[in-house]
Amino acid sequence: MLGSNSEQGPGKENGKRWKCNIAGEGLGGGNKLSARIVPLEQAEFYHFGNNADLLRSTSLLHNRVMDQREIWHKKIKPNPDIFVQNSKTNISFDGSNSSIWIENSDIHDGWRLHDHHIITGVPENKWKIELKAGICLDFVPVEKNKLCIRPYGFDDTFRGKATDGSTRWLNRPMGKWFAERNFSSGEIRSICNQDIYDCNIFPVLGKDEICEGFLQWIIEGEWDVKLGERYKKLWLKSKRFSASEIIKNENLSRLAELRKIKIKKSLLALARNHQQSIFYQLDLKQAAKEFRTRKLKLPEEPGKGEELMNRIHDLMFRSAYYENKKNKKSKAFSDQTFTLLRKGMLENLRNCKLRPVMSVKKDQILWGRSPLRLDLAGGWTDTPPY
């Protein structure tokens, strides 16, 4: 099962648990590796192999809750497979938008999106740009202050000889992209002389050097002939990475720092917009920890006119925020939570008082049925006087 040197240990015939001891070759002294296989009850598999899998599996995870009563936030997405994470989007989605993933990005109101986009790492901008259906755009932090612009097609595989007509980039044969931009045959040969994965086609520029016209020129759009020549020269003279080199040269420290900044902004925005967002449906203890460790300013408390459950959750959130500080505020907020919860439960009873009247005669017997044991106003039905 695990190779010729495998030694199967004790197991169960029904397949519930197996223990395998694997002899470690070259480790000396009879070292062994232990492995246990434990079947998970009702386990499910979600594949994240390519762009389509990313959207499909995330949509399945989100749709595990179908009961609308369990979904409290009011803003409904026009399409279930639109996902925005740690991003600022100043555009509105409508029914024409679908299959969109936006992460760690700033999307200005001048952007126009369609469908089947993966957009990641976009810096702050004021660009007016259109992404046609199936176009994806990624900005990768490299060096100390540069960005590698990585545009690609939603279904691009980045496999195959660059000069092969079946090798595609940005949803078209790779050679067509160069031909449309008036590259000479010599220029094409110098760039496309190997597998597309190793071709230097992704320019590296400073943030201030990137303009909307250059991006539109790369990803396909209308451009002036003179501007097209200027952008071609900029593309040729800029440092460029291949897909394989981006992995090696990505500045992971900068990426992590940029992500932290986006998360901070996202948390503050969710809290500020709690009436429409899912902020109070989050794991409040974890959210409080994030606010505490990131030293974020607590949001304003909901007003008395807001929904009762939002006010209760806000008090729970604040109690958890002060919990690890051994602060008396934690207990105070906790007490306020249960006080407000109790008032909310009893308010309807106060507003609608019941005046019971006995409608049976004194010699009549009233029979009722209940579970074996039912709690009625503090008394159990299987004990006197019931």
Image (spheres, rainbow, N blue to C red):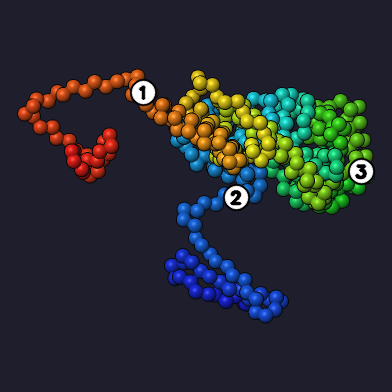
Indicate the secondary structure of the residue bearing disc 1. Answer: helix
Indicate the secondary structure of the residue bearing disc 2. Answer: loop
- Return the residue nearer the eye: 25 or 170: 25
Q: Amino acid at mark 1?
A: Asn
Residue under pointer 3 = 187
User: Residue lying farthest left?
Assistant: 363
Judge whether residue 97 can be spotted in this image.
no
- Return the residue nearer the eye: 49 or 283: 283
Q: Which part of the image, by quadrant, shows the N terminus?
A: bottom right
Q: Is residue 351 left or right of residue 119?
A: left
Residue under pointer 2 = 47
Q: Residue at x 57, y 49 (%)?
A: 46
Q: Indicate the quadrant where residue 69 lies.
A: top left
Tell me the distance, in whole angstroms, between the alpha carbons under discs 3 and 1.
78 Å
Q: Amino acid at mark 3?
A: Glu
Q: Is residue 177 left or right of residue 157?
A: right
Q: Are marks 3 and 2 in contact (CB under 8 Å)?
A: no
Q: Which of disc 1 and disc 2 is earlier in sequence?
A: 2
Which numbered disc, 3 or 2, marks the residue closer to the eye?
A: 2
User: Residue lying farthest front?
Assistant: 328
Q: Which of disc 1 and disc 3 is earlier in sequence?
A: 3
Which numbered disc, 2 or 1, marks the residue closer to the eye?
A: 1
**Residue 371 % position (x, y):** 24, 42
Q: Residue at x 58, y 41 (%)?
A: 326
Q: Which of disc 2 and disc 3 is earlier in sequence?
A: 2
The relative height of residue 31 versus residue 188 in the rendered view (above or below) is: below
Residue under pointer 1 = 348
Q: Residue at x 78, y 25 (%)?
A: 126
Q: Amino acid at mark 2?
A: His
Q: Residue at x 80, y 47 (%)?
A: 250
**Residue 211 % position (x, y):** 84, 29
- Return the residue nearer the eye: 120 or 226: 120
